[in-house]
Image (cartoon, rainbow, N blue to C red):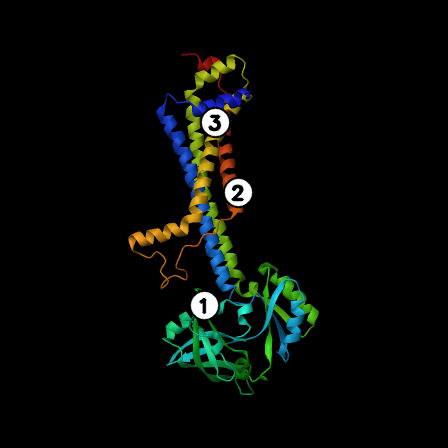
Amino acid sequence: MFRPLAIFIGTRYTRAKRRNHFISFISMTSMIGLALGVLAMIVVLSVMNGFQQEMSSRILGMVPHAVIAGVKPVDDWKPVAAAAMKNPEVTAAVPFTEMDGMLSYKGAMQPIQINGIDPALESQVSIVTQHIVQGRLQDLRPGEFGVVLGEITARRFRLNVGDKLTLIVPELSAAPGGITPRLQRLTVVGIFRVGAELDGSMGLVNVADAAEIQHWQANQVQGVRLALKDLYAAPQVSSAIATGLGADYRADDWTHTQGSLFSAMKMEKTMIGLLLLMIVAVAAFNIIATLIMVVNDKGADIAILRTIGATPRQIMTIFMVQGTVIGVIGTLIGGILGVIAAINVSAMVAWVERVSGQHIFTSDVYFISNLPSDLQTGDVVLICSAGFILSFLATLYPAWRAAQIEPAHALRYE
């Protein structure tokens, strides 16, 4: 089978057993280093993707994707929901009321965000029904002033289902200060745990009770909460719906409340990826050192090739092929092992926990109790491409050095 001279010799140098075993050892370590760097990048980025997906599903499963709120309390929310459902991106629209306040229990206090919900409809836009650990969401009956709290809040106050506590909300008044506190006695009817900071900052009451706490009519709500197909289209979709409803409505979405968190996670993934790329770069520098020693070792061979007619360009290509083969093999091995490890990392951590008897991610300390992994094809392609490119660039200088060797000088002492 015909092959160009440069490719034939370059691949032959790669396969051949060298006289200098140290060079062979350095070549092997370069390949192993590149494989380990690629493997580490794939596994770490997959785990970070898993964490991001886990946090997204939990946090954005609790907070509204988007809301259409009235400038004044909305008397009838159903026409607003019907207008929102006309948008093909909207999958559900339910009533909601939101207010901030303070919880007080036996002298202890903490800030809380209270969401007024319809227990019968909440499962359409929230995952809270899947994460109730005590009580039931359906126990939020109108007029009973029940509340479902997060597990962190319940643990902080040492609350259980049936305990009573006080909600303090600010109320505008004609008093000199302009604001007076309004107290409302609540009964704990449920506790949820989604494994995020919302467990310590959110509470749920019936939407009718929320209206009464704010001195509204029983049928009045703040607006409509939307669930969307594409979370990242929330600003555009909510704005379009609010514009269509008129000046009496305004739009809000998750990017205003949680956008900074997800931007920080994205930046963290980028920075860790760049740091791990340095491992691949170090392996590429090892390829440079390997090829420089090979060039010195093969000086006589290069001179003979030059004397029988090989051009400097062919000599340069020979060593570029050799270094690239090392890089390609190392990158492919690292890519294959990285994909296998990323797919099975959760099972491997679980096995380590069973064997050692120690929990790496205990639910008492961390929001998650396992190591999530989300292998994305784009990340694998990007990492392997970076490995290929760096290994190729690492061949340029040694190959250029080989092309500059003068035959007479190299054969002087042969």
Q: Residue at x 47, y 54 (%)?
A: 50
Q: Find disc 3 in the rendering and name its residue.
A: 322
Mark 2 or mark 3: which is in front?
2
Q: Find disc 2 in the rendering and name its residue.
A: 381
Q: Is residue 217 above or below residue 318?
A: below
Kind of residue sitting beneath label 1: His
Q: Earlier in the sequence, mark 2 or mark 1?
A: 1
Kind of residue sitting beneath label 2: Val
Q: Earlier in the sequence, mark 2 or mark 3?
A: 3
**Which x, y percent locates residue 271?**
48, 49
Q: Earlier in the sequence, mark 3 or mark 1?
A: 1
Q: Is residue 114 above or below residue 232?
A: below
**Which x, y percent locates residue 306?**
51, 15
Q: CA distance from mark 3 to mark 1?
A: 57 Å
**Which x, y percent locates residue 38?**
45, 41
Mark 3 or mark 1: which is in front?
1
Q: Is residue 319 above or below residue 272?
A: above
Q: Find disc 1 in the rendering and name its residue.
A: 131
Describe the element under mark 1 as helix, strand or loop. Answer: helix
Mark 2 or mark 1: which is in front?
1
Q: Are marks 3 and 1 in contact (CB under 8 Å)?
A: no
